[in-house]
Image (cartoon, grey):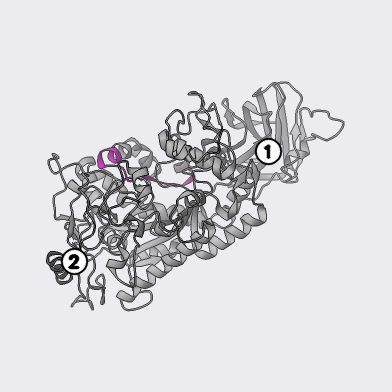
Amino acid sequence: MTRQPHHRRRPITVLSLLLLVMAVTLGPTPSSAAGTDWWNPVARPTPDSQIGVTGEPFKGTNSQGEVRGFVDAHNHIMANEAFGGRLICGKPFSEAGVADALKDCPEHYPDGSLAIFDFITNGGDGKHDPDGWPTFKDWPAYDSLTHQQNYYAWVERAWRGGQRVLVNDLVTNGVICSVYPFKDRSCDEMTSIRLQAKLTYDMQAYIDKMYGGTGKGWFRIVTDSEQARSVIEQGKLAVILGVETSEPFGCKQILDIAQCDKEDIDAGLDELYDLGVRSMFLCHKFDNALCGVRFDEGGLGTAINVGQFLSTGTFWQTEKCTGPQHDNPIGGAAAPSAEEELPAGVEVPSYDDDAQCNKRGLTELGEYAVRGMMQRKMMLEVDHMSVKATGRALDIFESESYPGVLSSHSWMDLNWTERVYGLGGFIAQYMHGSEGFSAEADRTKALREKYDVGYGYGTDMNGVGGWPAPRGADASNPVTYPFRSTDGGSVIDKQTTGSRTWDLNTDGASHYGLVPDWIEDIRKVGGQDVVDDLFRGAESYLDTWGASEGHKAGVNLAKGASASASSSESNPFTSFAPGRAVDGNADTRWASDWSDDQWLRIDLGSTSTVKRVTLEWERAYGKSYRVEVSTDGTTWQSAWSTTAGDGGLDTARFNGVPARYVRIHGLDRGTDWGYSLYEVGVYSS
């Protein structure tokens, strides 16, 4: 948008008083039909934002018994409380009313000269008209990254437009907080997370009061999938708490030394679960004691790498990628204002163009956290994890048949897409412009059809990311107001707050209330099929969540079983006997002689149906090997094979076969050593 000249604030004029009177007069008021129109509050604050939607929100399920509705899998309602409390200006609600909620940070007055983060992220000098209510001359805007976009009435409009699931990611970053000069609270990340969780519940209570009491509002925080289904069937919005922070539970690393332990992780996961959190990221922006991150690129990447150094004492370290997945490239783009924060004599390193993967993957503590989340039936967000960390996390989930994996805003390497769907996970795309969003949705449509799943979007509002720019009123297929919601039951007109009316065609996706307009733009550009996939999002998201809650760990038929092998490596100090691969101890292992044709045989003791075998390789892995089964130990059949083994944790799945004996038959080694397995698991499910 074009910035207008800025002047010092003037005394209230007759015109501004008239605008205020108009806002009070024309703004929403208590509904005279509140007794029957359950979606209208009995006591909305006056003055307040208009909603711009008429008609009853859809309820119930479709003819197949599925809930319907859109999913925003990644939003930050309470980000104004993050980063020290002065980076995102304005609140999603205020007991003192809209004028108090939608006002700028004090240092932005009178003309934005001290809006430091604004001009860092948006260029220029950061100057803008700081006044929010009632004029909203310069904000919120699609390219303003420092102003509140999640005012409750704007969220209400998205709900009225068909959204039924909203994931509120509690977010902060201690380093950004520490270097930003304006703050009014502690930079401790967990302190901020607790506050944001509390305020989300407070927002629920605030909305409830408008509707006559506890539990009566449309904004419902849910803590299990059945509760979410019930809320959606009532036509309301199911709100799920997530966490996206750089140092969860204080698990940072300094000079590669972890600043937390397993007890901290257990206590942290328990606390978050008790707060209602059901999904979370293990790392975000900076490497920590749990995992390495997927880099940012360009000048922003350089700036975040500086933050990485300030937080951890180390810069990102890269290596050549071993597969088609890669982290974002980092390199020569400068970030002078950030680099000035480095100690004298310290410079951001240069990186080889052919080394785009973070050396840091999922650490031992990170694996402990992943398994702890599985035990608590929580869902793991893999966006922002390095490909090395993501690959290991997916290996763990596949070995346990655990479906709780989410990619909520296009930060996962797209080559992981089918693995996520194969597990039963859920994927949402960042809130890109309608052309880009539609093109990406079309690219992955075949996979959604294959796995019979819906789609989601991640708005990342208040997430300092940028949002769709206007396509222009002269576009060949603009959004035409008013338009009908996807279900056909509501009419959506332009959104007005105070004296400002937004039009997606000319204003872009400036705030959360324009999500329905953006979806209509996708329909215009990408067609009804894309919107139909999005409208199935609520059902698919809840399928993933429900399957995670219902997951039961399989019984390892091989644990403690009798084992034999073609050979065992001799060592005077330790044993590499076959039984070490089935003793339940991840620190012991079987190792063969150093030749290709080797095998490990496991006697399950009795015949069972076998469907899944897991193999945790030591560095000496099998590149080509078979999983063979037998009922008598003499006649063998191949149940599964690969010629592309790459070590790590492998999971072999196949149709159930009866077997008393299972044999891992190595054909071609991946190294000059033999074959070495820490643990083999055999499962009937």
Q: Nearer the viewer, residue 19 or 530?
A: 19
Q: Quadrant of the N terminus?
A: top left
Magenta segment includes 424: yes
**Left of 329 or right of it: where is 22?**
left
The residue at which mark 1 appears reads as 631
For the residue marked with disc 1, what is the amino acid?
Answer: Thr
Q: Which residue occupies the foreground of this view, 375 or 662?
A: 375
How many residues crowd mark 2 within 10 Å: few (<14), some (14–19), many (20+)? few
Residue 588, by quadrant, is top right
Q: Which of disc 2 and disc 1 is earlier in sequence?
A: 2
Q: Is residue 413 visible?
A: no
Q: Secondary structure at mark 1?
A: loop
Q: Is residue 630 above or below residue 557?
A: above
Q: Amino acid at mark 2?
A: Ile
Q: Nearer the viewer, residue 164 or 233?
A: 164
Q: Is residue 256 magenta?
A: no
Where is residue 406 shown, x and y percent of the image?
A: 46, 48
Asked if marks 1 and 2 touch (Cβ < 8 Å), the reply is no
Q: Which mark is residue 12?
A: 2
Residue 653 seen by the camera: yes
Mark 1 Cα shell of 10 Å, populated few (<14), some (14-19), many (≥20): some
Work out how far the residue at label 1 is from the one at label 2, CA to CA, in angstroms.
Answer: 89 Å
Residue at x 21% of width, y 44% of height: 2
Horizontal and vertical percent position of residue 162: 27, 57
Residue 219, above or below 345:
below
> Is residue 344 rendered to the left or right of residue 159?
right
Q: Quadrant of residue 105?
A: bottom left
Single out the mark in the foreground, 1 or 2: 2
**Residue bounds of the magenta highlight:** 422-438
Helix, strand or loop at label 2? It is: loop
The extreme right residue here reads 572
